Amino acid sequence: MTAPEAIADLGTVVPRYEAIFCDVWGVIHDGVEKHAAAEAALRQARQAGRTVVLLTNSPRPLEGVARQLDSLSFSREAYDRIVTSGDVTRDLIASGPRRLFHIGPERNKDIFTGIEVDFVGEAEAETIVATGLFDDETETPDDYAELLARLRERNLPMVCANPDVVVHRGAKLIFCAGALAKAYGAEGGAVAMAGKPYRPIYDLAAREAGTAGRPTAVLAIGDGLHTDIRGANDYGVDVLLIAEGVHRDELGAGIGEALGAQGLAARYVMPTLR
C-alpha cells in the first residue's frame, strides 16, 4: 500500500481542489478548545476561493453545531456550510414511525424540533433513535446491554444519529451513539446509519458545495479511519488524514501499512490540520 504524502500545511494542496469537506471533532476542536491552526488553514482556503463544508457526525442539526463552534470562538469565516448527521437523521425520523424511544442526552433533543413524534418508553416504542449515551461522562456501552437486549427482543429498528464509536473530549475518550448501534447490530438488530461513512451525508455535502457528480473536485479531511477515511474512499474523493486525532494512540510510523491493513487509503497526511 502506498504511503500517503506528508504535507506541511493545507495550502500546499488547496489549489488542486474546489471544495473541502472537513471533519469537526478531533480536527478543528477537541470538544474543549478549538484548534487555532486549523481555523486559520480553513480561513485561508476560503480566501483562496475554495468552498469549505464542515462535515460532522454530530447528532445535532447544523444550528446546534454552529452554536457550539461559536462557544469555542471558532470563526464563521473559516467555513461556508455545515452538514451534520443530525440533519440526515431528521429525514429518517420524519419518514419513520411516530412513537419513538430516544437514547441520548437531553441536549440532543433539538434533532426532533419541528418533527411530529411521540416520546414513549421502551415498551410502547415503534422505533429507537440513538443520539448518544444518556451520560457519556460516566457510562459505557456495557451499561446498555440489558436495555438493548430487551429492545432487540421486540425487533425494534434503530436510527443511529452519530456513527462515531468514540471521540476525544479533551484528553478523555467518550463513547458515542455508534457504539450502541454496533452492539445492537451485533445482536441482530436493524440499524439505519445517518452519517459518515454512508453516502447520504456526502451527497448532501456535495450539493451544498456545488460539486455533485464531481468527486475529484473535493478534498476530504478527517481523523476517523472507519468514518472519515472509509466514507471518503467509498465516495471517491481524495483524503487528508489527520494522524493525531482519534486514532493517535494506534497509528505509528507505518501509516500506509495501517491503512492498507483495513483496506483504506489516504492521499495526504499531517499530524494536525494547519
Image (cartoon, rainbow, N blue to C red):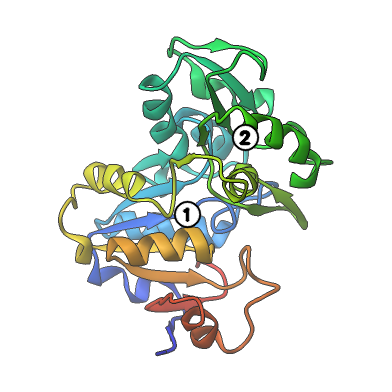
Q: Amino acid at mark 1?
A: Asp
Residue at 70% across, 36% down? 149
Vertical placement of 14 versus 96: above or below?
A: below
Residue 144 is tagged as none
Q: Residues within 10 Å of mark 2 (few under 14, many from 20)?
A: some
Structural distance between the alpha carbons of marks 1 and 2: 32 Å
Residue at 59% across, 44% down? 181
Q: Quadrant of the N terminus?
A: bottom left
Residue 152 is tagged as 2
Residue on which disc 1 sits: 23
* Residue 41 coordinates in the image, percent (x, y): 44, 62
The answer to which image quadrant residue 271 occupies is bottom right
Secondary structure at badge 1 equals loop
* Residue 161 coordinates in the image, percent (x, y): 51, 37
Query: In the rendered image, is residue 241 in sight?
Result: yes
Viewer-proximal residue among 125 and 53: 125
Query: In the rendered image, is residue 104 in sight?
Result: no
* Residue 213 coordinates in the image, percent (x, y): 15, 55
Q: Residues within 10 Å of mark 1 (few under 14, many from 20)?
A: many
Residue at 41% across, 57% down? 42
Looking at marks 1 and 2 on the same chain, the residue that comes earlier in the sequence is marked by 1
1 vs 2, front mark: 2
The answer to which image quadrant residue 17 occupies is bottom left
* Residue 189 coordinates in the image, percent (x, y): 55, 40
